[in-house]
Image (cartoon, rainbow, N blue to C red):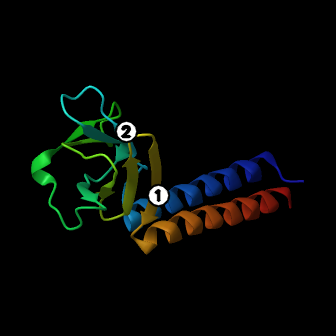
């Protein structure tokens, strides 16, 4: 059985290892946030409009609208995008409104930064509204860091607990 001094020593070592992993994660991957957008018909607008909202992004992304019917069209002049800082003063809420949309068309709101790309699609017809969204990690370090950091921390914690019991 381990003495109280050994338990304290190995507990401190465990905390140091976990903090080192977290620091390495932040340095290697950077602080970032991303979320899937939700696209809805904006009934508050004076004309037919779509509203794309995503609650958390960092660093600031770009927002691009696309249309299945008008492929290659530039919607920057008929859209308005804003970035609102969230209460924790780190991430931002992305809100983009596309004006003058036509019925029987599929529109896509694409939000992208150097870490991730999220797309929200909406098809509006006379009789229904269909939505679809997806998220893609662009930086391969993102998924590697998340899984490697968790796996290393887990193994090191188990090793420390094993050593404490010896």
Assign the N terminus to one quadrant of the image: bottom right
Residue at 23% x, 57% y is 64
Q: Is residue 145 above or below residue 45?
A: below
Residue nearest the observer in this picture, 87 or 77 = 77
Q: Residue at x 70, y 59 (%)?
A: 157
Outermost residue on the left side: it is: 77
Circle 1 residues within 10 Å: few <14, some 14–19, many ≥20: few
Instruction: Report which residue position mark 1 lands on.
Output: 134
Residue 33 in view: no
The Cα atoms of the two marked residues, 2 and 1, are separated by 15 Å
Element assignment for label 2: strand
Q: Nearer the viewer, mark 2 or mark 1?
A: 2
Q: Which quadrant: the C terminus?
A: bottom right
Which is nearer the eye, 55 or 104? Answer: 104
Compared across the picture, whether 32 is left or right of 157 comes to: left
Could you classify mark 2 by the number of other residues whose Cα lies within 10 Å: few (under 14), some (14-19), or many (20 or more)?
Answer: many
Looking at the rendered structure, the secondary structure element under dot 1 is strand
- Which residue in the structure is indicated by mark 2? 40
Q: Relative to 30, is 163 on the left or the right? A: right
Residue 85 rendering spot, x and y as whole percentages:
26, 36
- In this figure, what is the number of numbered marks? 2
């Amino acid at each position: 059985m381990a003495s109280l001094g050994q338990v304290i020593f190995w507990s401190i070592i465990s905390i140091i290892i976990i903090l080192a992993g977290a620091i390495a994660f932040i340095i290697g991957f950077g602080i970032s946030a991303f979320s899937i957008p939700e696209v809805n018909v904006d009934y508050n607008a004076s004309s037919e409009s779509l509203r794309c909202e995503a609650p958390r992004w960092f660093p600031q992304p770009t927002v691009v609208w696309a249309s299945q019917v008008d492929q290659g069209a530039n919607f920057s002049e008929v859209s308005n995008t804003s970035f609102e800082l969230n209460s924790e003063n780190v991430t931002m809420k992305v809100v983009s409104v596309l004006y003058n949309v036509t019925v029987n068309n599929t529109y896509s709101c694409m939000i992208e930064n150097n870490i991730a790309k999220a797309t929200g699609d909406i098809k509006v017809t006379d009789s229904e509204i269909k939505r679809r969204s997806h998220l893609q990690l662009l930086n391969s370090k993102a998924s590697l860091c998340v899984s490697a950091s968790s796996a290393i921390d887990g193994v090191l914690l188990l090793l420390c607990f094993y050593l404490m019991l010896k």
